[in-house]
Amino acid sequence: MADSELPDLRKTAFATLVDVVREWRAASRITTSAGVKPAFVEAMNGKTEQDLGFETWREFIEAAVAGGHVQTERLATSHTAILLPDEGPAVVATWPEKRTAARRGSEATQTQFRLKPDVWAAFVEWQEGHRRLWDSSTCRAFVFPLDENGEPAWASRPDRFREIEPVTAKSQKEWMREWALTCQAADREALLAALAPNAPLRSFRHELDARGLTFEWRDELQRRVGNHVREWAEAQGVAWLDLTVHREKGYPTTAPRKKQRKAQGRTTTATLEAEQRTTVGGSDLERLREIVHRAVDRMSYAELAAIPIRAEHLLGDR
């Protein structure tokens, strides 16, 4: 770009910044320097402050202030607010209320509904040559492949499919009973009583929660289901790797889970076995943190600035 074009481009950029701030204000959005930058870059068709001859975004904002296009106000959170020329500190004073209202509105929206996994997959995970149906009897969505004639593929190509042998409710109850017998006396009696034919619905789950045994039973159930699936896969000639989630290279392979029950002085056979095993990939929270960390390392300044983060997470280590 020729130097002669730079003044006109800057003039356009300053006007664009004012437009972005004005639009956000009309929408009751909080206009901080870091917050409006992604919207500004988008409005400028990808041009950044470097394209305008400024080394940093701060220099560009300072130039806009010097030209009377906007004004700035330092916030208690250490962010810089961008205000229109005819606005004053009174505008900033209302932002905490807007932030709280927006957060409450977001939380209300999130808690209104959550699609079931089968519904989400049926509507979102698109594959050509599949049909999606809703079973009004069982209230479940399911997807199945079609052949070239639009008929279920298992009819024309039965060799493609392997019938799955599920873990029956009877088998699961036997597992519960066998595992309960490995617990110490006080827990064992309560768990076995919860498995009695006349026990109220979900009694077993309630006892697990009350006695801090939920995670131990979950480990045991996962182990048993894994063994069941592995046996089925070997019998059907299905590769085990096709049934499991593949980990990326560099992923942590072990992450021992802390056992709260050790501090309580409770020990069971299942506990000792679980502690001798390692959890591949760590907990869901640890895996998510690893994924987020890798994603953040690849983000640009504009992408990072657009991420909403609660203030206490940024200030907690200061």
Image (cartoon, rainbow, N blue to C red):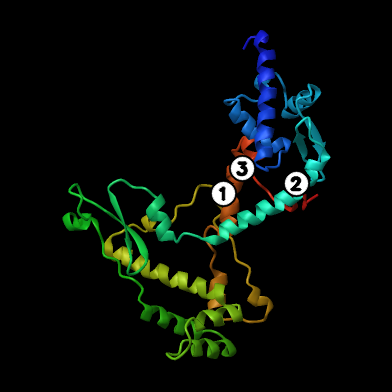
The Cα atoms of the two marked residues, 1 and 2, are separated by 32 Å
Left or right of 273 in this view: 14:
right
> Label 2: which residue?
95
Q: Which residue is at 60% across, 25% downward?
A: 44
Q: Nearer the viewer, residue 158 or 153?
A: 153
Picture quarter with the N terminus: top right
Which SS class for mark 2? Answer: helix
> Label 1: which residue?
291
Q: Nearer the viewer, residue 218 or 272?
A: 218
The reply to whether callout 1 and callout 2 are in contact (CB within 8 Å) is: no
The reply to whether callout 2 and callout 3 are in contact (CB within 8 Å) is: no
Which SS class for mark 1? Answer: helix
> Label 3: which residue?
296
Q: Which residue is at 61% across, 46% downward?
A: 293
* Residue density around tag 3, few if under 14, some if 14–19, many if 20 or more, within 10 Å: few
Tell me if residue 209 can be seen. yes
Q: Amino acid at mark 3?
A: Val
Q: Position of residue 3 (x, y in %)?
A: 67, 9
Q: Amino acid at mark 2?
A: Trp
Residue 221 vertical position relative to residue 256 in the rendered view, above or below: below
Query: Which of the two marks, 1 or 2, is nearer to us in this view?
Result: 2
The Cα atoms of the two marked residues, 2 and 3, are separated by 27 Å
Query: Which of the two marks, 2 or 3, is nearer to us in this view?
Result: 2
